[in-house]
């Protein structure tokens, strides 16, 4: 382990990443990827409308939609876009470092596309009113919208390659080539699914906003509602096809993690019911779109919330599932969720993880430093997912298994940790040697007896391992 370890002991590291990632993907997919093309389409419809009054209404409505998009994407979207990689680099720097080495050119290209996208949305929004001066200017402005839509999709297309790689690297483990990493088995199914779902979300988001921006007397209310409903329905088969192919491409061992990923450990037995509830919710969103297409002028405004909440909730749940089911890996068959390489485990089992960690205060376990060494082992091996007494508390998990009314049993804890990856397949194997296992168990037992907060390197600073730092063979 070559990085100091950031740790949040109440909310947990994974919760930090989850909150930022889900918020960002909702904004990116629904607004940047799915919404902007629809806004551009409606601007084009206004441009092609012969009736000047209706054309003005189309233009006004499209501009209001774009205003909402512009505000959200340039504030929360931009902050979470940068924030997700910043948070991921803090929480699991080893995985981000590995991904950068593999996808350097992809990330560089994505950065260029992203900068272009930012410039395009500024140009598209700020030049809107000026573009109304002539039909030629308006036509050029619509082209700006089309280009913005393309660049927004390109950013997603590049990042999806990296996300797919993390689930299934394909042939990359054998040949280590860039294109093997990009064209991984999960790439195209996930891209098709995300594209279709993003467009659907853009449609339902526009329908939701139309309840505020269009009234019953507006001459474009009926055609606009039908266009937005048709947009949502048109992309539904694409999303369903992508979802089906995506599901059958998921590695078998990851499918086994789905019940816990969807329902958590407490409600994993409800997986079947929860799965059908999700399917029913998406079906309800499609039904609302069909009814809006059929009777757009008599449909209650309240129901416009339904597809929005359902699809946003569906995408948020999908992100939770995608992140969880790839465990015990953060990069499938290459790096475990704790940031340790799979190929290095035999070395750690022989020597322990402490001698090979650059930023620890205990290069090896002794009787005098046993608790401190156990804390260091916990930081390295456990804190990417666990806290001491916060979210996903390690103490609570053991008390839930062995009871909270008595001291935890040392022998039982050791036996469980040694074989936990067989019992719970989403858990990485314990990486350390026997002495480090003893130290870890002693530290967890001390947390039960004397609860205290464990701070990361961002609060406590770091110690350096003189044996690791000065070892020129490492």
Image (spheres, helix red, strand yellow):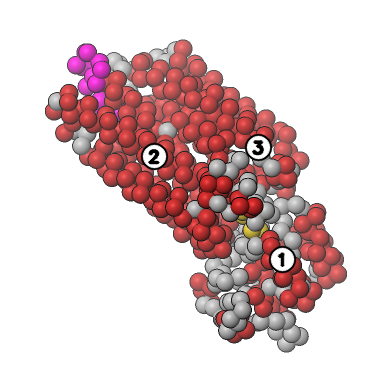
Marks 2/1: CA–CA distance: 40 Å
Image position of 265 with respect to 249: above or below:
below
Q: Identify the image quadrant of the C terminus.
A: bottom right
Inspect this view and state whether residue 417 appears. yes
From the viewer's perspective, tell me whether residue 64 is left or right of residue 419: left
Residue 17 place in picture, x, y as percent: 53, 55
Please report contact status of discs 3 and 2: CB closer than 8 Å, yes or no.
Answer: no
Q: Residues within 10 Å of mark 3 (few under 14, many from 20)?
A: some
The mark closer to the camera, 2 or 1, is 1
Q: Secondary structure at mark 2?
A: helix
Name which residue lies at 32% across and 28% down: 40
Image position of 362 with respect to 102: above or below:
below
Q: Residue furthest front?
A: 175
Number of numbered markers: 3
Inspect this view and state whether residue 393 appears. no
Q: Which residue range is magenta in the image?
A: 47-62
Q: Which residue is mark 3?
A: 249
Q: Which residue is mark 1?
A: 345
Name which residue lies at 23% across and 31% down: 141
Marks 3/2: CA–CA distance: 26 Å
Name which residue lies at 24% across and 40% down: 123
Image position of 42 with respect to 117: above or below:
above
Q: Quadrant of residue 57?
A: top left
Looking at this view, is 179 or 312 the one in front?
179
Residue 408 place in picture, x, y as percent: 81, 68
């Amino acid at each position: 382990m070559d990085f100091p370890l950031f740790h949040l002991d109440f909310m947990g590291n994974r919760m930090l990443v989850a909150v930022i990632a889900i918020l960002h993907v909702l904004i990116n997919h629904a607004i940047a990827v799915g919404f902007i093309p629809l806004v551009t389409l409606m601007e084009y419809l206004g441009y092609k409308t012969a009736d000047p009054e209706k054309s003005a209404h189309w233009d006004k409505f499209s501009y209001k939609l774009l205003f909402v998009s512009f505000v959200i994407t340039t504030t929360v979207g931009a902050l979470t876009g940068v924030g997700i990689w910043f948070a991921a680099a803090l929480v699991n720097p080893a995985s981000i470092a590995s991904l950068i080495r593999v996808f350097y050119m992809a990330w560089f290209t994505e950065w260029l596309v992203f900068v272009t996208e930012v410039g395009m949305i500024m140009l598209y929004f700020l030049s809107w009113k000026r573009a109304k001066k002539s039909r030629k200017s308006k036509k050029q402005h619509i082209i700006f919208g089309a280009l913005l839509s393309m660049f927004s999709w390109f950013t997603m297309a590049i990042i999806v390659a990296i996300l797919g790689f993390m689930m299934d690297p394909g042939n990359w483990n054998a040949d280590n080539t860039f294109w093997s990493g990009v064209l991984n088995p999960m790439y195209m199914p996930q891209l098709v699914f995300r594209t279709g779902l993003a467009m659907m979300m853009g449609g339902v988001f526009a329908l939701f906003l139309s309840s505020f921006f269009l009234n019953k007397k507006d001459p474009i209310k009926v055609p606009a509602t039908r266009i937005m409903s048709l947009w949502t329905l048109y992309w539904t088969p694409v999303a369903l096809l992508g979802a089906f192919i995506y599901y059958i491409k998921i590695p078998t061992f990851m499918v086994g993690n789905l019940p816990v990923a969807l329902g958590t450990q407490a409600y994993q037995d409800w997986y079947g019911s929860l799965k059908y509830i999700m399917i029913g919710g998406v079906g309800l969103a499609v039904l609302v779109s069909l009814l809006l297409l059929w009777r757009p002028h008599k449909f209650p405004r309240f129901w416009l919330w339904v597809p929005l909440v359902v699809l946003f909730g569906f995408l948020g749940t999908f992100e939770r599932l995608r992140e969880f089911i790839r465990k015990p890996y953060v990069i499938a068959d290459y790096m475990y969720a704790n940031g340790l390489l799979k190929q290095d485990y035999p070395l750690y089992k022989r020597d322990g993880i402490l001698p090979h960690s650059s930023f620890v205060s205990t290069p090896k376990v002794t009787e005098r430093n046993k608790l401190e060494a156990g804390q260091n082992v916990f930081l390295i091996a456990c804190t990417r997912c666990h806290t001491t007494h916060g979210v996903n508390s390690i103490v609570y998990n053991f008390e839930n298994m062995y009871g909270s009314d008595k001291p935890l049993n040392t022998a039982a804890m050791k036996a469980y940790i040694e074989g936990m990856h067989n019992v719970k397949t989403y858990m990485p194997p314990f990486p350390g040697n026997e002495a480090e296992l003893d130290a870890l168990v002693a530290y967890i037992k001390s947390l039960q007896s004397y609860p205290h907060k464990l701070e990361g390197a961002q609060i406590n600073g770091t110690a350096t391992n003189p044996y690791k730092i000065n070892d020129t063979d490492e």
